[in-house]
Amino acid sequence: APSEMDEKLKARIENHPCYSEEAHHHYARMHVAVAPACNIQCNYCNRKYDCANESRPGVVSELLTPEEAAHKVLVVAGKIPQMTVLGIAGPGDPLANPEKTFRTFELIADKAPDIKLCLSTNGLMLPDHVDRIKALNVDHVTITINMIDPEVGEKIYPWVHYRRRRYRGIEGVRILHERQMEGLQALQEADILCKVNSVLIPGINDEHMPEVNKAIRDRGAFLHNIMPLISAPEHGTYFGLNGQRGPKPKELKSVQDKCSGNMKMMRHCRQCRADAVGLLGEDRSQEFTKTKFMEME
Ligand code: CLF
Ligand code: SF4
């Protein structure tokens, strides 16, 4: 029965600050920045900064080795008792750095088995790794899906690097799209919870968003997080295409509202940095820089 399903889902998300709106006041998450490489190019990305698919552009997170990351997680968990979720979300794409990402998860699962593991990806390599994700007990995955129509995608992604070859233009976008849909379906089959992030880019994918919403809903995603493109003129660049601006709050809300009749929308995303620590909306990353946490027990 659907209500029984809802109860089960509720139990699975109730202490995840991103997946449950109520939870974000009481439960904290942290990210460890162990994944520097990326395998696609988004037009809105400036690679000097964190991956904008999950994170706030214009922020440079401190890169850690898996061992340093595991040490940091234990230190933070000892100081912040509400810490329930550990996510890997950059600064590049976690699945473009599979050895680093999975090594980090293994170390943490071994030393702190109560911490839930979470992963955010552009989806290109996801189908190859679903078995490993399942085996490591990662039950929450986020895929950033900005389009389901390669003609829209052509305006967002200039190239995709896949199995040692670079594909430009629509050819690359088609691969990305097929892999995202395949990955989504594989997560559903493996019973791994999936949220979809979409970066809203006015004039590019705003009118297309209800179609994206329908496609992901049909393939089992349970939460849709439509995030604003953030342009950052203070860094000398407008993130995006030919000086593309981010949506106004009203524009964002209107697209979220259009999709909200169909599935649960996330509206409390804080576009965290790849080394974020604490409750959503509080940034304690500076308390736990490498020089500081390496000294802490
Ligand atoms: Fe991190 Fe992302 Fe997991 Fe959350 S953040 S990997 S799902 S644990 Fe959350 Fe931050 Fe928004 Fe991400 S508020 S940017 S949605
Ligand atoms: Fe940049 Fe993230 Fe896009 Fe890679 S996936 S190009 S890191 S925004």
Image (cartoon, helix red, strand yellow):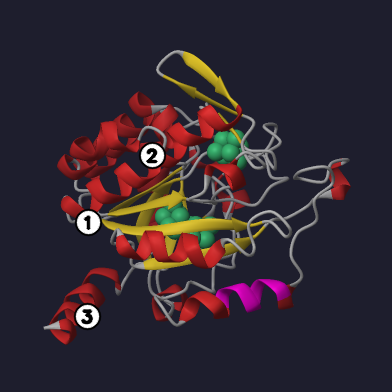
Main secondary structure found in the magenta portion: helix
Q: Name the front one of labels 2 and 3.
A: 2
Q: Amino acid at mark 1?
A: Asp
Label disc, if present, on residue 178 of the rendered structure: 2
Q: Name the front one of labels 1 and 2.
A: 2
**Residue 65 location (% of width, % of height):** 44, 27
Residue at position x 35%, y 57% from top?
A: 85
Q: Amino acid at mark 3?
A: Asp
Q: Report how far apart the C-alphas of labels 2 and 3 lie in the structure.
A: 29 Å
The numbered mark, 2 or 3, whose residue comes first in the sequence reads 3
Q: Which residue is mark 3?
A: 6
Q: Report how far apart the C-alphas of labels 1 and 2 lie in the structure.
A: 34 Å
**Residue 281 location (% of width, % of height):** 59, 68
| Crowd around label 1: few <14 · some 14–19 · many ≥20 (10 Å) | few
Instruction: Please state, as top left, top right, bottom left or bottom right, where the C terminus lies in the image.
Output: top left
The numbered mark, 1 or 2, whose residue comes first in the sequence reads 1
Residue at position x 64%, y 78% from top?
A: 254
Asked where in the image residue 258 lies, by quadrant, the reply is bottom right
Q: Which residue is mark 1?
A: 114
| Crowd around label 3: few <14 · some 14–19 · many ≥20 (10 Å) | few
Which residues are the magenta region? Answer: 251-256
**217 relative to 38 in the view: left or right:** left
Q: Secondary structure at mark 1?
A: loop
